[in-house]
Amino acid sequence: MDMSEQFPKGKSESTAGCQFYHLYCTTFRNNEHQVYHSSFVDEDAITKACGCPLLPLKSHVKGPAPVSDQDKTDIVDEAITFFRANVFFRNFDIRSSADKLLIYLTFYINVALKRLEGCRTLAEGTKAIINLGLEKVPVPGEPNFPFPRLFPLPESQKEAELLRNYLKQIREETSGRLLSVAYRPNGTPNKWWLAFAKRKFMNIIVP
């Protein structure tokens, strides 16, 4: 059921959106065991770069990721689906290397929503996301990488560039899918999503 159905009819979307956001705050502040983990725990055949699994993606964006079947859930689906729950946590119990990628994507979605916060139309939001995509993607050991101890440092420049290209690809794919939920079909902002730009995942200040 759409969470918006839980609020009385007749209230403005803005008011209902604030109530929805505060409901999430109240729920997850007191239930830290509810963090959602990635289902991609079978890593035997997965290539890694800096300990990050290069998981398959349902993507037409050019990059090193293997192609996933379109009818299967991929890590981007998980990150977007779990975001509004996982963003509330300051700690994350890592159970697999895929969880590390999920953490990275959760933070990236947090950053992207912050960029979309003031964009009143899909066109404005798309422009903001394109500008975000033009920024250099740091890898472990470089300035501005958000989780210095999440992944080991690259052992070579080749490994660093492999990870950078994968992260660039997965960020672009995540951005495209995020726009489809952050804005409604008529191009107006979806407050059920943009309200979460206020959060700081794992207490990290969003740039």
Image (cartoon, grey):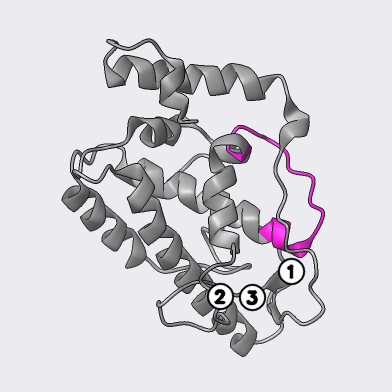
Q: Is residue 98 magenta?
A: yes
The spot of residue 3 in percent (x, y) is 47, 26
Q: Secondary structure at mark 2?
A: loop
Mark 2 lies on residue: 69
Which residue corresponds to mark 1?
152
Is there any visible trace of residue 146 in the rendered image? no
Q: Closer to the N terminus: mark 2 or mark 1?
A: 2
Foreground label between 2 and 1? 2
Q: Considering depth in this image, is 55 or 167 the residue closer to the camera?
A: 55
Q: Which picture quadrant has residue 56?
A: bottom right
Q: Is residue 105 left or right of residue 121?
A: right
**Crowd band around label 3 with a 10 angstrom C-alpha radius: few (<14), some (14–19), many (20+):** many
* Figure label count: 3
In whole angstroms, how far apart are the C-alphas of marks 3 and 1?
Answer: 15 Å
Q: Which of the marked residues, 3 or 2, is nearer the chain's N terminus?
A: 3
Q: How far across and down, in percent of the image, does residue 172 sit?
A: 40, 66
Question: Which mark is on residue 58?
Answer: none
Percent position (x, y) of residue 121?
A: 18, 43
Task: Give the secondary structure at mark 3.
Answer: loop
The residue at the point 59 percent across, 44 percent down is 82
Residue 54's disc is 3
Residue at point 27%, 60% (across, down): 131
89 left or right of 7 in image: right
- Tell me which secondary structure the magenta stretch mostly adopts: loop
Q: Earlier in the sequence, mark 3 or mark 1?
A: 3
Residues drawn in magenta: 86-100
Specify whether residue 95 is painted magenta: yes
Residue type of the residue flagged with mark 2: Asp
The crowding category of the residue bearing disc 2, from other C-alpha atoms within 10 Å (few below 14, some 14 to 19, many at least 20), is few
Report the mark closest to the observer, 3 or 1.
Answer: 3
In the shown orientation, is residue 40 left or right of residue 8?
A: right
Within the image, what quadrant is residue 16 found in?
top left
